[in-house]
Amino acid sequence: MKKLNLLKKVTFFAVFAALPFFGMSQEIKVENGNVKVKAGKTAIETKNGNVNVSTNTSTAAKVSTYQTKVGPKNILGNDIKQTITCYGEDVVITGNENYIIIKGYVKSLKLTGNDNKVNLEKVTSIRTLGSDNTIVYKTSPNKNGMASVSTTGSDNEISKH
């Protein structure tokens, strides 16, 4: 199986390396887990779980975007300061005294622990278990514009700003 995968990789790079001989420019960039490939007037880019295909030609071209389904994002530990970006995933945070900023859309947030601070852009539902947690969100896709909230513990603050 490893030989077959190696053969596929070698074949891909050999074909891609030959593109300039056919008058097609090429570019491959890999950065922070994202990949961008350009060949001629066509570009394919993966970024944060999305795959974008675009073309710049004089004829009509189909441009499409496909968003991949990703499992839940888990943050486990204490005293973590982190910013993440979500595209509809569930987020599970377990720990104490964390400061988490979540950009993008979160389907559901589950927070277990104490003295955590979480800022979200967009969230459908929030569930907390613990004490002295602060969760602030900007918007929700729910009809009333408010996230569905369930909290167990004391002195938890969940608010929309």
Image (tube, helix red, strand yellow):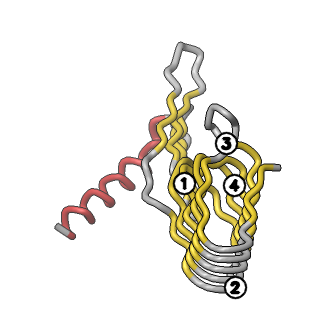
Q: Residue at x 57, y 56 (%)?
A: 29
Disc with the residue nearer the chain's start (2 vs 1): 2
> Alpha-carbon distance for marks 4 and 2?
20 Å
Give the labeled residue for mark 2: 79
**Please, what secondary structure does the residue beneath circle 2 have?**
loop
> Alpha-carbon distance for marks 2 and 1?
22 Å
Callout 4 amino acid: Lys
Disc with the residue nearer the chain's start (4 vs 2): 2
- Report whether 112 appears left or right of 14: right
Where is residue 44? Give x, y as percent. Answer: 51, 41
Q: Residue at x 25, y 63 (%)?
A: 5
- Report whether 89 appears left or right of 144: left
Q: Which mark is residue 108?
A: 1
**Please, what secondary structure does the residue beneath circle 3 have?**
loop
Where is residue 86? Give x, y as percent. Answer: 59, 54
Marks 2/1 in contact by CB < 8 Å: the verdict is: no
Disc with the residue nearer the chain's start (4 vs 3): 4
Give the labeled residue for mark 3: 140
Q: Residue at x 55, y 64 (%)?
A: 110
Disc with the residue nearer the chain's start (4 vs 1): 4
- Report whether 65 appears left or right of 151: left
Give the labeled residue for mark 4: 103
Whether residue 125 is visible to the viewer of this picture, yes or no, is: yes
Disc with the residue nearer the chain's start (1 vs 3): 1
- Report whether 105 appears left or right of 7: right
Q: Which of labels 2 and 1 is toward the front?
A: 1
Marks 1/3 in contact by CB < 8 Å: the verdict is: no
Callout 3 amino acid: Ser
> Alpha-carbon distance for marks 4 and 3?
13 Å
> Alpha-carbon distance for marks 3 and 2?
27 Å
